[in-house]
């Protein structure tokens, strides 16, 4: 191993790399080498190692690198604690309006985490699962968030393949690729019995102040009440609620950082 990457200074350079990627969104290897004062080969090797652990990823069709899912996950935990209380009143109104259970989910690695939810009051209903984790590809909210990532990143999350929870679960990575492509094109994801056969759900993205995805908003109900067409009909109300949450998140961020922009 070269002396450049064999000393404690490597830790400093790695942390500086993460900070630079946060500031500039993406960097070329040559840019990083110049900033760190190391050879291009050294910068490339460092990015490769960071990429193996998910802290950086290469942009598709580009020589530029950006933060990977592992780095984004670190920053997402405190945001999640602020997100739930900000969004909860909006979830309650949407649940009352729809008469169904609504949830807010975030992506944590390959899993979708139920951050908050409001349960339907109907006798036959979907229960909230706040705090629960499931494979992201089994949920409408999880697929909505996976669709925001390059598929090479998604593929690396499920390198061992997909496990089918029901006969409706996506069978393989090729099927997941097609589903996520469709999700990006139409702006929403569907869960038609893919985690629990009798549950249907629809999910859309909730975006943060800078426009990046921070969570997914979903509405879920039993298959006896919901089919594909009736779920899609909920989109206007879901989008109105997502926009209200996003507005409150921006206002909260402005209060905390009044001079940031």
Image (tube, helix red, strand yellow):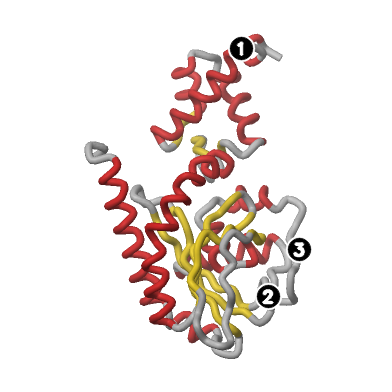
Q: Which mark is residue 163?
A: 3
Label 2 with label 3: CB-CB less than 8 Å: no
| Residue farthest to the top, as pictured | 3
Q: Nearer the viewer, mark 1 or mark 3?
A: 3
Image-quadrant location for residue 246: bottom left
Q: Could you tell me how far apart the alpha carbons at marks 2 and 3 are, in whole angstroms?
A: 13 Å
In the image, what residue occupies the spot 64% across and 53% down? 110
Quadrant location, the N terminus: top right
Q: Which mark is residue 196?
A: 2
Quadrant location, the C terminus: top left
Q: Earlier in the sequence, mark 1 or mark 3?
A: 1
Within-10-Å neighbours for mark 3: few <14, some 14–19, many 20+: some
Q: Secondary structure at mark 1?
A: helix
Q: Secondary structure at mark 2?
A: loop
Label 1 with label 3: CB-CB less than 8 Å: no
Q: Nearer the viewer, mark 1 or mark 2?
A: 2
User: Vertical placement of 41 versus 157: above or below?
Assistant: above
The residue carrying mark 1 is: 4
Q: Earlier in the sequence, mark 1 or mark 2?
A: 1
Image-quadrant location for residue 179: bottom right
**Residue 138: image x %, image y %?**
64, 66
**106 or 92, nearer to the observer:** 92
In the image, what residue occupies the spot 49% across and 46% down? 76
């Amino acid at each position: 191993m070269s002396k450049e990457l064999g000393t404690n200074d490597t830790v400093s350079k790695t942390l500086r790399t993460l900070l630079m990627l946060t500031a500039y969104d993406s960097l070329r290897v040559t840019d990083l080498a110049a900033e760190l004062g190391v050879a291009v080969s050294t910068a490339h090797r460092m990015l490769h190692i960071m990429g193996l652990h998910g802290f950086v990823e290469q942009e598709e069709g580009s020589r530029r690198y950006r933060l990977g899912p592992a780095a984004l996950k670190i920053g997402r935990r405190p945001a999640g604690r602020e997100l739930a209380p900000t969004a909860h009143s909006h979830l309650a109104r949407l649940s009352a309006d729809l008469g169904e259970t609504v949830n807010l989910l975030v992506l944590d690695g390959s899993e979708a985490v139920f951050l908050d939810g409001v349960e339907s009051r109907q006798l036959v209903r979907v229960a909230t699962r706040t705090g629960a984790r499931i494979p992201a590809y089994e949920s409408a909210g999880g697929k909505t968030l996976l669709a925001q990532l390059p598929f090479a990143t998604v593929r690396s999350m499920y390198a061992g393949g997909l496990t089918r929870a029901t006969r409706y679960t996506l069978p393989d990575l090729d099927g997941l690729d097609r589903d996520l492509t469709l999700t990006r094109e139409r702006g929403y994801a569907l869960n038609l019995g893919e985690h629990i056969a009798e549950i249907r759900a629809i999910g859309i993205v909730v975006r943060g102040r800078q426009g990046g995805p921070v969570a997914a908003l979903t509405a879920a109900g039993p298959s006896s009440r919901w089919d594909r067409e009736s779920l899609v009909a909920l989109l206007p109300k879901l989008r109105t609620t997502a926009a209200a949450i996003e507005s409150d998140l921006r206002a909260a961020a402005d209060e905390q950082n009044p001079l940031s922009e």
